[in-house]
Amino acid sequence: MSLTHQAHADRDGSGRPLVRIALLGCGTVGSGVARLLIDPAAAVAVRSGIDFWLEAIAVRSVAKPRSAEIPSELFTEDAARLVEDPQIHVVIECIGGTGVAATLVERALANGKHVVTANKDLLATRGPELRLLASRSGVTIQYEAAVGGAIPIVRTIADSLAGEHILEVGGVLNGTTNFILGEMGAGASYESALEQAQRLGYAEADPTNDVEGIDTAHKLAILAQLAFRRALVTPNVPRTGITKLGREDLSLAKRLDMTVKLVACARLGGSLVTPAYVRRSHPFAQGTGAQNCIRVMGQSSGSLTFAGTGAGGAPTASSVIGDVVAVLRHIETGIVVGAVADHTLTNAWGVERTIPLRRIVRLVSLRDARPAREALRSAGVAAEQCDGVPAILTTQALDASNDDLRALLRAHDLAAESILPLWEDLPAEATVAPAQATAEALSVR
Ligand SMILES: NC(=O)c1ccc[n+]([C@@H]2O[C@H](COP(=O)([O-])OP(=O)(O)OC[C@H]3O[C@@H](n4cnc5c(N)ncnc54)[C@H](OP(=O)(O)O)[C@@H]3O)[C@@H](O)[C@H]2O)c1
């Protein structure tokens, strides 16, 4: 049986395909996927019009107690056997990480099996290469659940916006930091907000991936790969986490009628993950907790905003099942949907170039505002005073780093308590005037 033939599945007596599925991982997401696959009321087969069979579920330990709804005979500890098994046509990977999951996905694709995965770490670091491997094996790798949980954004960019010239993609992509910043906005310190997030299950015991912005950078890299057809990977995204924020940053935001969010943004030529002041009326400021907000700015489409639950077992499993249905339809019809390999994908991104944003410098006292503004001005950095609060907004400091600004102020015996960017949209005309839009999109340092 050729690899491609294998991916197209066996047929029953009436010529209908019978697809055999293996699920790898049965934790938060995988158990939700398993339940939906074995529940007749979920009607995956009806929606796809194809018979399928959940052959096995690989886990680390079969001894671990599992949901009674999932037949125990499905469990195995031998994931490697499943990805080599010629009887398996589709592999759903819900293990996570870039270790064993990467090897299993690679083997499955090389063996001509379609892969569905929620693994953002893997797609963000090795997405272009895996898509190419899938395309060479005549199969697809689907990963709608890797970004934004239940929000249908991957296929929207890959398919619905395939004809759009995208200028910018990004948003607020991480529920844990959203929760922590919400608590800090209500007066908590970073440490107690993190503790609360861990108690409620929003943050993991080791929260590094979330609070250092790595999870957000993964999601941004995946969105940017699709939007700009560039091989942007996580290590090339300039990234700042939320660990250095104090509750004073949040209280200053409140006085400015703003909030602080961990914002992600990619434009052609640059990208950025950073905590930023966001005006309260802006779509990025609206979500709390697990709510994500993703925005795509297209030359012709203008601004498109997608909001919804960005994490959690059930929403993510729903997204995985959507991908499974897409794969089943593909097997039935041969029509590919979703993010297929783009052979024009290039590395020419502009490694580690960040997107310049104006910055708000938080000062010790209101008295410092005027001297600080003058000190910056004398060094060629224009700044304006924020009304009635100890802060100034830089207007022409795009080439100066935060350290440069701090040093300038220190030389005048002034202290910058914190320096954070102010999130501002591309100007409206960017979406209607091509020449100007391109210049804006490329405006990076
Ligand atoms: N949780 C979310 O809200 C969410 C949202 C979006 C995307 N995702 C992504 O979804 C994926 C899964 O996340 P999760 O939260 O469901 O993880 P999880 O709860 O930790 O589950 C991981 C599963 O993988 C199994 N596993 C680990 N090592 C294995 C091995 N060597 N062989 C076979 N199975 C192995 C574990 O087995 P045991 O059960 O025996 O330990 C467990 O069932 C990740 O890529 C994550 O980034 C998660």
Image (cartoon, grey):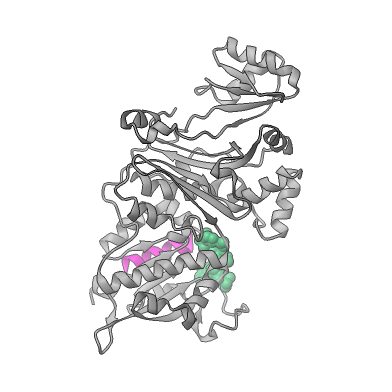
**Image position of 164 with respect to 145: above or below:** above
Give the dominant element type of the magenta stretch: helix, strand or loop: helix
**Image position of 414 with respect to 329: above or below:** above
Q: Which image quadrant for residue 108?
A: bottom left
Furthest residue toward bottom: 13
Which residue is rendered at x = 39% and y = 79% of the image?
Answer: 45
**Image position of 363 with respect to 336: above or below:** above
Q: How many numbered dots are placed on residues in this image?
A: 0
Left or right: 172 as drawn, with respect to 116: right
Which residue is rendered at x = 43% and y = 29% of the image?
Answer: 444
- Pick whichever, 36 or 240, lies toward us: 36
Left or right: 233 as drawn, with respect to 412: left
On the rendered image, what quadrant is the N terminus found in?
bottom left
Q: Is residue 160 magenta?
A: no
Residue 3 in sight here = no
- Pick whichever, 102 or 259, lies toward us: 259
Which residue is rendered at x = 64% and y = 12% of the image?
Answer: 374
Residue 424 in the image: x percent, y percent?
Answer: 52, 33
Furthest residue toward top: 378
- Range shown magenta: 99-111
Q: Which image quadrant for residue 82?
A: bottom left
Residue 47 in the image: x percent, y percent?
Answer: 38, 75
Q: Which image quadrant for residue 248?
A: top right
Quarter holding ligand 1: bottom right
Residue 247 in sight here = yes
Residue 294 in the image: x percent, y percent?
Answer: 49, 48
Left or right: 306 as drawn, with respect to 138: right
Q: Is residue 108 magenta?
A: yes
Which residue is rendered at x = 48% and y = 55% of the image?
Answer: 147
Residue 219 in the image: x percent, y percent?
Answer: 48, 50
On the rendered image, what quadrant is the C terminus found in?
top left
